[in-house]
Structures are given as C-alpha cells and as structure tokens.
Image: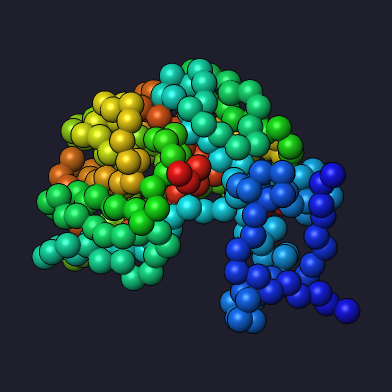
Amino acid sequence: MASELRVNTLKDASGNNSVGMSTVAEGTAKAWMQAVGAGTSYNDSFNTSSLTDIGTGNIRVTYTNSMSNDDSSLTIGHQYTGTGGTGAYFANAGAMTTSTHEHAHYENAALKDPVKYDGTIHGDLA
Amino acid sequence: MASILKVDEMQGVTSAGDITITSEGGSATQSLQQGVNKLWVNFDTNTTGTPAARDSLNVASFTDNGTGDATISMTNNMSNGNYTIQSAVATYHGQTDYRYPTFIKGDISADSWGAVATGSFGTITHAVQNGGSAYTDPSLVMKSVLGDLA
C-alpha cells in the first residue's frame, strides 16, 4: 500500500535547512524534455506526451498533466549544428498554452533544425 | 498546528528513487525526483584563466578550453546523455551587447554530440559566440540541468 506523509516543513535531522513543502512543490520542475533536432521524438522527458514537428526548426511539446494557467516559466536551450557563421543564433520560446509550448530555432537568421532541443517548465500544475 | 519533518534523506517506499507529490491544483501527482534540478551554477568564464563558480550545485570543476569555451565537470554524473540543459548569459567582460547566445557545444562526455554511446555523462561543454562568430568570455553564465542522475 502506498504511504502518504502530510507535512508543512522539512528540516534536516539537526533541525537546520528548513524548507516548506510549498517551496518544494513550487520549486519543482513540472515538465522537462530533450528532443531530437528533427522534432520527431524525445530522447528523454518528464510529464510530456506527444511531440509535434511543426516545420523546420519548430516543434510543439504537449504535456501529460496540464498546467493550471499559461503563465508558466519556460526555459530552453538548443544545441546548434555548427559554431561558425556570421548571422544571429537564436533559441526562441514560442506560443504557450496550459498543455503545450513551442520552440523555434534559428541559425544565420533562418529557421533550422538544431542537433537537439532542451526545455523545462516551472509553474503550477492543474 | 504546523507539522515539521526532520530528516536527512528521503526515499520512496515502492521505489527508492521515486517520491510522489501532489500538484498545486490537487488534480495530478508527479515525481519529486524528476522535477528537482540535478545541477545549477552561476559562474564567470574569466578572461584570464579557468572559469570560477560564484555558487553551484553538483559542480566539481571547470576546464578552460580557450576563449568562450569551457567544460563543467559534475560531482555526481548523469545516467545518460538525454538530460535537458538551460543556459543564460547576462553580461560580458568589456562589452555592452547582450544579444550573444550561449550554446551547447557538445555536452556529455564526447567531442561532438552523439559521438559516444557510453561514458561518464559527467561533463557539459559550453561555448559563447558573438554575432560575428567569434568566441567571447562572458562574466556571468548561468546553467541548470534536469534529467536522471546515475
């Protein structure tokens, strides 16, 4: 049988390093993923379901459990296909809903599939 | 009355590496371990020597690979190379242009992404390049990692 512990505050055994359960819950990432640059599959992920390849350099991530609103914090990182070039390199966060977010990857001012996409969501689960 | 749990280590009962927490809205549950950052660091790439962390979690050391290019070695390694990395660059030594991105030059223990199927998975190599394709040493780089620890 699963055990459930209800507690407001966690401390180490010495009574130091106190942290409230609200901080643990709020500070925990609600979803993360690493996807292949083609946008066709996840290498690994947490709380994600489908992955949509919208087009070159553009993907949509869908969550298994939705967020309570679309004000979540999305942090992203993309691995670039090369280190040369003279144009701008951008990893952009795209449209967000309670159940999805999008990535856009540019190299030399044009959309391009990166080597991989990384993304993390913080906020409130529904 | 507020309840306080004093403990040094927590493990799941069914699976040691899986403790479930309830969502803020109460309609879902998720793994605590999966949502916890496995590494974070705030560091100066240092134009004249090895990068130095201002504060960090799970960072053992830095290797300076040259201007704008450094490798972070972890204290506890990841279990595979499929982890997610977030990065931000805030300021630059002697520069005021904040447009320059930081990119993942080739993380995990490989010279290039995907070049190895096995390894310690304990390093991240990062590089910062400006709009003119030259490497540059920013004074403030921040990174965090989520994924599976070994």
Residue B64 horizontal side relative to residue B39, left or right: left
For image coordinates 79% across by 43% down, the residue present is B28
In front of the other: B61 or B118: B118
Q: What is the residue that sits farthest to the bottom in this orientation?
A: A15
Identified at 82% across, 63% down, the residue is: A6
On the question of residue B91 being in view, the answer is no
Q: In this view, does B98 lie above or below A17?
A: above
Q: Going 35% across and 35% down the picture, which residue do you hit?
A: A79
The image shows residue B50 at horizontal and vertical percentages of 17, 62
Is residue A70 shown left or right of residue B135? right
Of the pair B74 and B106, the residue shown nearer to us? B74
| The C terminus of chain A lies in quadrant | top right
The residue drawn where x is 63% and y is 23% is A50
Residue in front for this viewpoint, B7 or B130? B7
Question: From the image, which quarter does the N terminus of chain A lie in?
Answer: top right
Question: Does A38 sit left or right of B110 as displayed?
Answer: right
Q: In this view, does B101 lie above or below B4?
A: above
Q: Where is residue B116 in the image (x, y as percent from the top left)?
A: 28, 27
Q: Give the number of marks.
A: 0
Image location (x, y in percent) of residue B109: 28, 39
Residue B73: x %, y % from top left: 29, 52
- Visible in this render: residue A96? yes
Q: Farthest residue in the right direction?
A: B1
| Structure colour scheme | rainbow
